[in-house]
Image (spheres, grey):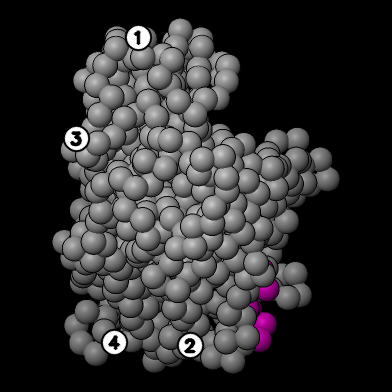
Amino acid sequence: MASPEVKIALEGEEMVFTGGLRSLLPLAVRNLIRFNKLNTSNTSGMAEGYKQANVVILHKSLADNFEKFCHANNGPLPLLYRSKPGDWKCPSLSSNSDIRTDCLQYRVYEYGLCTGTLTSLKEYSDQLKDMVTFYLGCSFSFEKAVQKLGVPVRNIEQKSNVSMYKTDVPCLSVATFCCNLVVTMRPIPEDKLEAVVLATYPLKESHGAPVHIGDAGLLGIQDFSNPDYGDPVQPHPGDVPVFWACGVTGMEAISNCKSPLAFAHSPGCMFITDQKNEDAEAYLKEIPEVHCISQSPLYYSIVSAAAVKRIRDLESLIGIDPAGRNQGPVIHPLLRLARKFSKSPVRGHRGVKHLFCQDQLLKACLSISHAQSVLITTGFPTHFNHEPPEENDGPPGAIAIAAMLQALGKYVVIVTDLRAMNLFKQIIEEAVQQGILKAPVPLMSYQGDASESALMFLCDDGNVKKPRFDHLIAIERAGMAADGNYYNARKINIKHLVDPIDELFIAARTIPGVTTTGIGDGGNELGMGKVKEAVKKHIKNGDVIACDVEADFTIVAGVSNWGGYAVACSLYILNTCEIHDRYLRKAIGFPRLSKKVVWASALPSVTKEENLLQILRHHGVRSGITASLEMEVDGLSFYSTHSDMIEKLLGVLH
């Protein structure tokens, strides 16, 4: 703690230093520490504006591998300086310093165990001649920058050490150095989150931006009230837990290394350098934004403003009403006839624009980006008089999403009606043969019988703490209406052709950490329950056909396939965003941007979608509006309308 009044022991007496330690220069603070003149437990707030450092001291034989470990996990272990063996000074960081005496307290590690604490390492001077000191960045360094924004730093307010927790997030191992990430936690008012991220993101040598915002349990922290290091810090109403990578990770690494002798600073008892903190604005190349993607459990994600803009551009493109193209040669003759004589809803007059919800594409894709396993469902048997009854809007979008998820290394399955399993199996096999998919996507069905409840399907043994999937996506999937039936756009009940996959989305709402997305273009699709009132008001037959089942995120598109293409493109944007990539990997390991070429190869393309539509035609899957087997989707020509949309979506990426 560094309160405005700090007690200093001087010649056997206690004196009060009224100016506090915030305004002292680092050399003065180090001298007070060196001669054991401070009666305080940590260095938070001391020598404001100057960098503080974690300290790890190892035998020289381990130094090279530990340096590699730091570079491989530079979020928790930003390396400021590495000394030579036996060098007790660090001239590039400070003048007149001695690492044996200039930390408030040290820990001694013997064969991995902490065997004691000391205020000086001078008694180990002989051993230190063969040891190397690592100075690593510390989050205390950015506290002043946070306070300048008017953001309270609760640990300083409460005159306590910062809370530090062990997580279940593994660092990237190097030789004998392996451990899980340790994080610091600071409660931040919800309306200040983005300002704090903006202030800390450029300060790479002080751990940079947070690695987690929200529920501690998502990091594997079991007892939030009992930190592993430091003190409990009490949040105020409206505060959100914000976690930064922590240099104490280095202590865990040397403990697991089990070297005969090692030293480290005690948590919170940092080495104070003469280096001033970086000017945040000078290093701000990109602007980070914070977006809430879950309320239960509470979870936020971080992404660059540039990536957000591009995803919003995608959302605007797919929301275009196909009616904008209904004047001219691009409209298929059958669609013209449908518009002239049919009483059923026809593209361009469905009121889709009234269903639009801003930023649903962004939030859905942020949530999917954080997921490890994803379930996709599709299939709308609108053509009940044909075999198969499926329409060709939905499967292409589902496969486009699945292809990108595969490329990102996520587990993905497709769930559809039992009667359509063989059809989808053949479609997927041929998609793999033509390079549309890299590998087959596992197929599943769900009938909702008594022996297989939705929870049993979604979770191991029905245990909500062990979900099999993190995210569920429905794209152009027939959705259950308020009366329990399933309707096509013409108000015809097709329940006899539809398995109750809606039950999975309803059950998912009871499973913490599982989120859902619905993609549709008419309001009768699974997941559109969020906009059902707008469907009833603006969509023909909406009072009957409106889906009653909500998803957490609702993506509305002029054609549902477009929504699927936009999801694939958005996931590419997010994973090629350096800010989001760092947040995904908790600032450990190396950036994954080297995989960009692989991800790009998984994007939808005009050629891929043309080939997939040919596959669907071969299997008798028809256009939704006209029931035609021509190269069209929802009565709109592929060679103009849909190919044009694909090119425009890809254009946003470049």
Q: Which residue is mark 3?
A: 91
Foreground: disc 2 or disc 3 = 3
Question: What is the x, y in percent for residue 622?
Answer: 42, 62
Q: Earlier in the sequence, mark 1 or mark 4?
A: 1
Name which residue type carries label 1: Asp
Q: Horizontally, is 610 left or right of 187 in the view?
A: left
Question: What is the x, y in percent for residue 263?
Answer: 44, 21
- Residue numbers of the magenta segment: 541-549
Residue at (41% x, 64% y) in the render: 146
Which quadrant is home to the C terminus? Answer: bottom left
SS for dot 2? helix
Q: Which residue is mark 2?
A: 354
Residue 497 visible in the picture: no
- Mark 2–mark 4 Cα distance, whole angstroms, equals 16 Å
Q: Quadrant of residue 535?
A: bottom right
Residue at (19% x, 83% y) in the render: 329
Name which residue type carries label 2: His
Q: Which class describes the residues within 10 Å of circle 1: few (<14), some (14-19), or many (20+)? A: few
Q: Which residue is mark 4?
A: 324
Q: Is residue 2 above or below residue 305?
A: above
Question: What is the x, y in percent for residue 299?
Answer: 55, 58
Q: Which residue is mark 1?
A: 126
Foreground: disc 1 or disc 2 = 1
Can residue 200 be found in the magenta stretch? no
